[in-house]
Amino acid sequence: MPDQGHPTREDQIRSGSGFSRRDFLKGSGAAVAATTLAQSVSETEAAQQAGTKVAPAKASAVKLDINGKAVTVTVEPRVTLLDVLRDDLSLTGAKEVCDTANCGACTVLLDGKAVYACSVLAHSAVGKKIMTAEGLAGQGVDAVAQCFVKHDATQCGYCTPGFVVATRAFVAAKPNATVEDIGKGLGGNICRCGTYAGVIAAALECSKKGGK
């Protein structure tokens, strides 16, 4: 039996004066939405005010030594070496795949050391010798590339330029390498097609020949 001193749910509905849990939630939701909107407006205004005080980076000319040739490009400080190679110089051997320095498809040589072009700023490469997959050939097909063809170390071919460049640096630093050495030395390059057996065979042969 309902308590005579307190209105029942039915009484509240009839009178329209009751405050239900649903009413409470509706009110709370509106308050949260209003607070969020106010914060968003405040943050936007702050960002706009801060933005007016930040001077945009200006592009400047940089001189790079790429594949034995001096080239000059005008780029902003934020531009990577990979972007310069592909967009400004049409050297597309280095591929943009992950853009997070994980796959190795953009590998180039910087003073003989294999590096990811996507993680090197063009401005920081000034004064260093840059070698791309295109520059390895010289007057003919590079010996490493020949070994890759011989051992069928390619499939889709997208990762191949980066692997060839990385292998060139590896065999120069590690003659007579073992399979374990190759696994560690080329561990920074990924082949999505899974042609690792061919890559290892190619690297083994090149390593034994000193890269020749």
Image: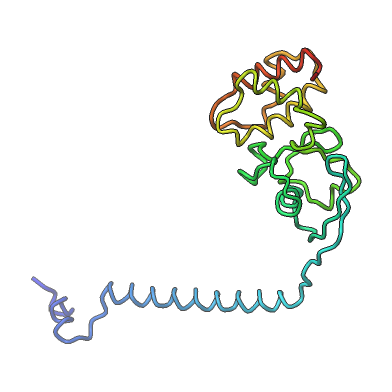
The N terminus lies in quadrant: bottom left
Q: Residue at x 73, y 78 (%)?
A: 52
- Compared with 196, 33 (above or below) is below
In the image, taking residue 77 as reference, residue 118 lies left or right, namely left
Horizontal and vertical percent position of residue 193: 53, 30
For the residue pair 159 and 46, the one nearer the viewer reads as 159
In the foreground, 37 or 71? 71
Q: Residue furthest front?
A: 139
Tell me if 130 is positioned left or right of 15 in this view.
Answer: right
The mark total stands at 0
Q: How is the image coloured?
A: rainbow
Residue nearest the viewer, comparing 125 with 14: 125
The single residue placed furthest to the right in the displayed view is 127
194 or 91, which is in the foreground? 91
Q: Identify the residue shown where x is 83% and y is 56%.
A: 73
Q: Quadrant of residue 8?
A: bottom left
x%, y% of residue 173?
A: 82, 22
Q: Residue at x 72, y 18 (%)?
A: 181
Could you tell me residue 200's position as x and y percent?
65, 19
Residue 162 in the figure: left or right of residue 175 = left
Q: Is residue 127 above or below residue 170?
A: below
Question: Quadrant location of the C terminus?
Answer: top right
Left or right of 184: which side holds 11? left
Quarter holding residue 24: bottom left
Whether residue 140 is situated above or below residue 90 in the rendered picture: above
Q: Position of residue 109 (x, y in %)?
A: 80, 36
| Residue displayed at 76% across by 51% down | 89
